[in-house]
Image (spheres, rainbow, N blue to C red):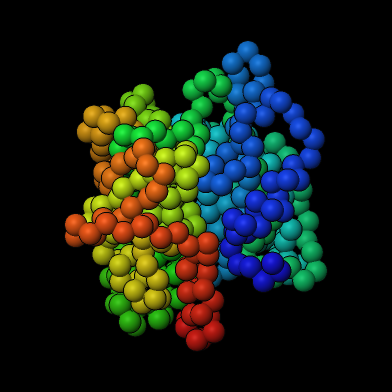
Amino acid sequence: MSQFTGKIDGGSFDELILPRLGYHRPNIKQGPAFGVDVSLIDLGGNLGMAMTSDPLSLIPSLGLAESAWLSVHLMANDMATTGFSPMYAQMVLNLPPQFSQADLTTYWDHIHRYCKDIGVAITGGHTGSIVGQNSTIAGGGTMLLTAPLDEILLSNHARPGDVIIVTKECALSSAAILAMSFPQTVQQRLGKEVYSESCALFYQTSSLPDALAATSTGKVTAMHDVTEGGVLGAVYEMAKASGVGATIDNDLLPVGYPQQLVTQLFGIDARFCIGAGAMVIAAERGSEQQVLAVLAAKQIKGSVIGEFTERNDCRLITRGKSEPLPYFEKDPYWSAFFNALKKGWK
């Protein structure tokens, strides 16, 4: 348990977390659950409050501005699955002692600007330093929003017959962060052009515009942002949370050229690794062209990759052959990153 990297595994979550959720309040409409991005509270009068929490990034190999971007937008991506923009944020910073006042000013200025750009007010938190803190996680944050209760979407509301649309491409954040973290190796092995294209993917890692565009059609039933486990992991989680099955056409999965090369270099499968920036969308059958059109109007790529089904299993179709869709508890990105460090990749 003390040695896990990434999210806690499903068994530990079920056995340790779920039976111990503090005081029971009946107005909690959605609490912690596998494959669900946000919690939802009924405030009365058809007003709902949605919230999510995530780590705050502080990754020296990326830079302060880029770390701040991930800190803000990975939380905002979760909130986007409701179909609404986040409104408020609480931030807790546990910084390393060597983190200078100048660095804090730069980092926090970017946190402020990125929140302001998407309409998020920072309402409180905690800021301090801790001896021995050398992690790429600088603390944690929570984002909240209020909206009409009956209009807030949840990722466990996908229905049989809904089409599955994924925005952008697989492995956006994995390819970008690996390239930016090991620039010399990527340029030497793959060339400067692939390196530059991979780095350019970094600022595509916000899926808030994707979600707001798609939900404007009124045809979206559920969404799940792509994080650990990649696009296929997100589809699997969404199906299991909703109590439905899924059929995915492997040949329709969008994987860009730089992501293919970078993930191959690091020995991981682009379909199953961290892919922040992409959004998995369940939409009413027959509405797919309408959803794709509103995405395209915002210059956002969308691809129909399958459908949710009645049967409670997930299938992956590859060149006409149907196999069970695998699900991995641990995202391969983490081992790829740390293995590269051990190899001395620069």
> Residue 220 in the image: x percent, y percent?
37, 30
In the rendered view of the protein, which quadrant contains the N terminus?
Answer: bottom right
**Camera sees residue 31:** yes
Residue 12: name its quadrant.
bottom right
Residue drawn at (74%, 29%) of the image = 25
> Residue 133 in the image: x percent, y percent?
73, 68
Query: Is residue 259 or residue 116 the one in the foreground?
Result: 259
> Residue 95 in the image: x percent, y percent?
72, 61
Residue 198: name its quadrant.
bottom left
Task: Give the residue at the far top of this rendering.
Answer: 45
Residue 169: name its quadrant.
bottom left
Residue 281 vs 330, above or below: the answer is above
Task: Give the residue at the far front of this rendering.
Answer: 311
Residue drawn at (37%, 50%) of the image = 314
> Residue 30 in the image: x percent, y percent?
61, 33
Task: Give the residue at the far left of this rendering.
Answer: 320
**Camera sees residue 93:** no
Q: How many marks?
A: 0
In the image: residue 276, left or right of residue 219: right
Residue drawn at (55%, 58%) of the image = 67
In the image: residue 339, left or right of residue 33: left
Residue drawn at (54%, 84%) of the image = 342
Query: Is residue 336 or residue 248 the one in the foreground?
Result: 248
